[in-house]
Amino acid sequence: MSPFRASPGRRAVAVMGQCQGSGAIITATTVLTCAHVVGSAHTAAVALPGRTGTVHCQVVWSNPRLDAALLQSPKPLLSGATWLLKETPVPMCEVTSDRPLPHCEIVGFPRIQRYEGQKLDADQYTGTVLPLAGIIRKTMTFAFDQPPAVEAPGGPSPLAGLSGSPVYSGNALLGIVKEVPQGRNHLRVECVPAGLVFTDPDLLDWFARRSDNIAPPRLERLRKTHPDDTHYEEEYGEALRAEYRKTKIFGLDELSRNDTEWDLDTAYLSLEARPQSRAGRRAPVDSAVPRDYWNLPTSREEHGSGPQQIEELLGTRPRVLLRGDAGAGKTTLIWWLAAHAAAGTLDDRLAQLNGLVPFVIPLRSLRAQGDGFPSPAQLAGVSRLMIDAAPVGWAGRVLADGRALLLVDGLDEVPQEDREEAHRWLSRLVHRFPLTRCLVTVRPLAVAPDWLASEGFEELSLLPLHDEGIRAFSAAWHRAARLDDEDVQGIDELERGLRQQFDLNPALRDLARTPLLCAVICALHRLRQGFLPESRWALYRSALEMLLGQRDKRRRVGTPEGITLSVEESQQLLQRIAVWLVRGGQTEFTQDQALRQIERTLDGMPKVRRQGKPEQILIHLLNRSGLLQERSAGSFQFTHRTFQDFLAAREFIEGDQLNELLRHATEQEWHDVLLLAAGHCSRRELPVLVTGLLTAGRQRGTRGSGRTGLYVLAALCAQHAAWLDQLTHDRVQDAILSVLPPHSLSELHHLARLGSQVLPLLPAPEELGISERGQLAELVSVVGGSSAVPYARRLALAARGEPHGEYLLTRDWARFPPEEYAREVLSGLDLANTIVYLTNEAQLAQLQLLPHARYVGVTGSIAPTVLSRALATSELYSLSLDNNSLLTDLTAVEGCANTLTKLSVEHCTQLADFTALPALTSLTELNLSRVRVRTADLTALARAPALRRLLLNNPVLVGDESLDLSPLRTAPGLKVLISEVSEHRLTGRAALGERLTVSHPRGCNCPEAH
């Protein structure tokens, strides 16, 4: 799964230094070789197979004790079709098994392979790595399968020149050759293990200092191997990219001149999500030390509980249950992750996923095919990739080595009665293979809160697109449209016109809160030259007409199947298939199943029957409707489940089956169908549907999520009715008022579906208690947008002086227009005692409007120059910086040096320079969590003139590196607390005496920088 597709032989080079040796290309500009090859020189020449001349490289690191050195080239060493031009490290592995590891190879330039006198050529050897041979000397031993050469007594070794040669298991580098041991008849060589090289502190420091932010190679574990694994993984990665790198963008494939798919990056929009709040979080200190003694900041879970980009959240959470509405982008995210992880092209936020092996598990397909939940051996086949069967045991080896990325899509597609079986399957899998990273997607209310919490899953909820997100999606959609339309100016005008409609029409914005509906609006706006439907149901109806009626006409496609269907005829056929799927709790169907539904429908469609057999009509629908697609061989589905539910709802209403629908009112998987049915109801039927839902809600007994969900569903059905009697309207309003404010997270999710329509019904915040105001603040922030600002202002005035209420209002600033929210809401809060949370540059630009803000938390990768500019005029007491991969030093903080008393830095992976700390003359408390800390850094910390408290929580130490605390003795008033690090890795403790407190790790070791 490495993004490097070059074979090991293509990575081996000859190195000319103090003597001739070999080397391994690690990144496109670095070479690993032996220290004795380069000697004391500062440069060495590198020769590449098939190239004339040499490249002079600088020796940037050398460790004679290990006998390893790193060379840096001034230009990329390899390029072309077999290599990505991106500098991505070669995969490194350390052998974690005691058993011999066969099927390994060495590629290098030994003396025996020279020809025509002294010309170099590569040689290749196969053999077995013996993990226990040389274990005391920390040396890796390689035993050749066949004698490589005859040992010449008294002369130079025929294997001279092999020093520095890479030792590979598949595509993974295990180490480099360093010497031929005496007395073994050239049957063995001794090697430097990669695990020792890439945990060397000085080498990792060199990578950290690089301006191009290239991460050091990540060490993976290798227990056992198979000769066919490497080749299969390359093919598997190519098949994944082919399957998931392309997608259809709604409205572009239908309207384009070329029936084509689009690169997923064109369609992908980075979405926002919110972590679930978690009570009872573990304090980062030992229970013997009171948390308030240190006046610690809230934990990262609390800091990160506001909206953040989904990539930021997934990067720090190995197991995630992701909740999202229909059309929210869950499946697109799964595909995007699979394609990019396989290619190794994810950015710093998700860099840990690069090179992992994605297993995409579309649960809807399993259900349609009648398969059970897959065993490890079946994981590779679930997606039906165009690839041969995997080598026996391959998936198990990937899982055991911690190299798997499990992407489970559509848990809500599993029938309710089978979800516990799904839970057992997933639980067994992650317990058996605990290093597996996993993402599971589900509709918001399909499973209970914390459904997978016992298995270590954290919950995230995709948020509706906020106003800026809608603009970004629209811009991306029109950018893709320009690629296929010669009338670029016309597309520009349409984009400007739609942006204006979004800005002026709140109802239109409310319709565009998911990527799917936003794409529908963009497509219809283009088709209708600026005119748009005004309701959700009108949007779907227009989209179906566009797909079924306009698609072929616009493309000037005739009747290749000999079938001509009107829009109505196509819908009649499709809705029979859809209703059959809904009744059966399915989303996929086989050809035979579809043919039976078409055959029954044709009894009432003689005109269509005369045109062809059911098989011909099905082929026509598959090829020409734009609504059906083949998911795998012999298995089909609607292009989106929303269209399936919309057509099924129409069939229920036209078939006078409203009572059947209402019998399923308490079943969550039927709620979308019930909602969409409202758009098909007549003036007589709609009150029956709405009243039936209200009645079902009242029958749920005491108030709870079930009752609230049904009341909200009734309100949504009534929301866009062309006509509904006043009595029914009043009953809906009374029902919603009876469940306000929400009493639980699930009730909040239900009520948030009403969007801005719920705002006029909210009770006056001045008349509520603190807890109820907090619940309303949560609801208002989920609704977000400009329409929610006035109510948020009322909440701010009522909550002034209440820490929790003010926290909720500052936490979700990103859900509102930045400047308007700062002026109208935040300016009314007591910011002298409340943390203001910021997640983007637009918010930072408004910090000047909050001169009384004293506590600020900044989450996300924001450029240090932007930070510096925003903080220069502030008078902060406390600042936290979290998850910023662009932060390399702390100079951005110097603008508030005279007032800043407390600084917290967490999970900023590139931070390597603390020399700005002495300039922070008022700083009394410094908290560093999951940050790389070296002994040399403590010298800068000790020079901070006012520093009195230092917390090091889970510091990132490299390999076997220890942290010498003695530099801190020069700060006599400093108290130090260190948590989540083994005591044996701390030296110089006596220098601090009683001023040092060490919290013992709770079941985990200090994180290694691999």
Image (cartoon, rainbow, N blue to C red):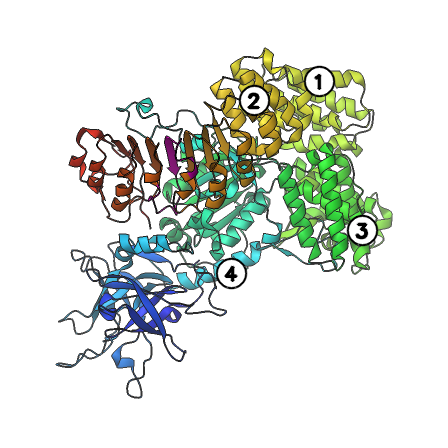
- Residue holding disc 3: 550
Q: Earlier in the sequence, mark 2 or mark 4?
A: 4
Question: Could you say which quadrant of the image residue 319 lies in?
Answer: top left
Which residue bears the numbered disc 4?
Answer: 238
Report the mark closest to the observer, 3 or 2: 2
Q: Which residue is mark 2?
A: 828
| Residue positioned 67% across, 54% down in the render | 480
Q: Would you say residue 913 sits in the magenta stretch?
A: yes
Residue 106 visible at all = no
Residue 650 seen in the current view: yes
Q: Amino acid at mark 2?
A: Gly
Q: Nearer the viewer, mark 1 or mark 4?
A: 1
Q: In terms of secondary structure, where does tag 2 sit?
A: helix
Q: CA distance from mark 1 to mark 4?
A: 55 Å
Query: Secondary structure of the magenta portion, mostly?
Result: loop
User: Who comes first in sequence, dot 2 or dot 1?
Assistant: 1
Looking at the picture, which amino acid does disc 3 mark? Gln
In the rendered view of the protein, which quadrant contains the N terminus?
bottom left
Q: Amino acid at mark 1?
A: Gln
Pointer 3 or 4: first along the chain: 4
Whether tag 2 and tag 4 are in contact, CB under 8 A, the answer is no
Please provide percent x and percent y for residue 18.
Answer: 23, 73
Residue interval drawn in magenta? 895-916
| Occupied quadrant, residue 54 | bottom left
Q: Could you tell me if the residues under marks 3 and 2 are in contact, i.e. CB atoms within 8 Å?
A: no
The Cα–Cα distance between marks 3 and 1, rounded to whole angstroms, is 40 Å
Answer few, some or many: residues within 10 Å of disc 4's Cα (few below 14, many 20 plus, some between 14 and 19). Answer: some
Per the model, the C-alpha gap separating discs 2 and 4 is 55 Å
**Image position of 671 (left or right of 408):** right
406 sits to left or right of 53: right
The Cα atoms of the two marked residues, 2 and 1, are separated by 31 Å
